[in-house]
Amino acid sequence: MPSTKTVDRPQEAVTVAKRYLRRERPLSASVAVLVVAVFLGTFVATSLVPAAVVGALLVVLVRAPIIKPRGTVRLRTDDDTDSVVESFTGVTPPVLVFQWGIANGVVTEDGTVTYRLSYLFGLRSVEATVDTRTPHMPDGDRRIGLELTVGGRPWSTYLVTVDTRDGQTVVEYEYTAERRFGLRRIPQRIVAKRYRDEALEAQGYVVVERSERYSVVG
């Protein structure tokens, strides 16, 4: 049976996630404001028909799914490997801080965790679901797979490897977006870049190396 529970979330990380949210929402809204401004400017300068054409083209441009990010990250922490594996397979995986850090509620069922998120001043909501897999690896590595689904659609996957080097725990993960995004998501990603390392550091992880790539299609 599904169960709703109060989650003991790392408060320093939650604080960072909420700062991200406060800056991301107005910046993302500015894309819509820009489209409306261009539409109105075209209408004033010409007439309704050209303005409608320009507005429609802008909407298609900002919403068209053309960008697909992926990357690799290496982290270091003083926590032992068992604690790290537990955190990545638990209700609040460190790499999903911008989901659980701003969630209004959490539901767990059969190893699957769902974060309930609201936006547009609470008028709309969406569910982000995490499916965690821990395949047995014969080489002794501790590996974890996280599959994130948002609104019932695949969103991203994370392949995590946990190891010990020089007395410290090293975490390496590769993330891949499972869907392409439009230009309207760029402000969101800009703000996320500003806070993602800080959010990980708030959970005890130091970012040693990060590599990000984007594929773009027309």
Image (spheres, rainbow, N blue to C red):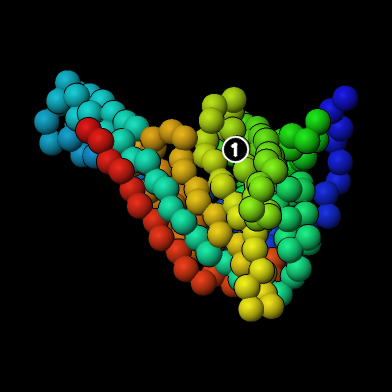
Which three-letter amino acid code belongs to the residue tagged 1? Leu
Query: Foreground residue, 93 or 49?
Result: 93
**Residue 180 position by quadrant:** top left
Residue 4 percent location from the top left of the image: 85, 35
Classify 10 Å Cα crowding around label 1: few (below 14), some (14-19), many (20 and above). Answer: many
Furthest toward the front, the residue is 138
What residue is rendered at 39% in x and 37% in y? 181
Residue 217 percent location from the top left of the image: 25, 36
Query: Mark 1 sits on what residue?
Result: 148
Location of residue 86 with respect to 79 vertically, above or below: above
Residue 169 percent location from the top left of the image: 67, 69
Total label count? 1
What residue is rendered at 41% in x and 60% in y? 211
* Relative side of 92 to 187, left or right: right
Res. 191 in view: no
* Relative side of 60 to 123, left or right: left
Res. 106 in view: yes
Location of residue 195 with respect to 64 vertically, above or below: below
What residue is rendered at 77% in x and 40% in y? 106
Residue 192 percent location from the top left of the image: 49, 56
Query: Foreground residue, 218 or 139?
Result: 139
**Residue 45 position by quadrant:** top left
Query: Foreground residue, 100 or 73?
Result: 73
Q: Secondary structure at mark 1?
A: strand
**Residue 19 position by quadrant:** bottom right
Furthest toward the left, the residue is 46
Furthest toward the bottom, the residue is 166
Location of residue 30 with respect to 39 vertically, above or below: below
Furthest toward the top, the residue is 49
What residue is rendered at 88% in x and 25% in y? 1
Q: Is the C terminus in the top left, top right, bottom left or bottom right quadrant?
A: top left
Query: Foreground residue, 31 or 143?
Result: 143
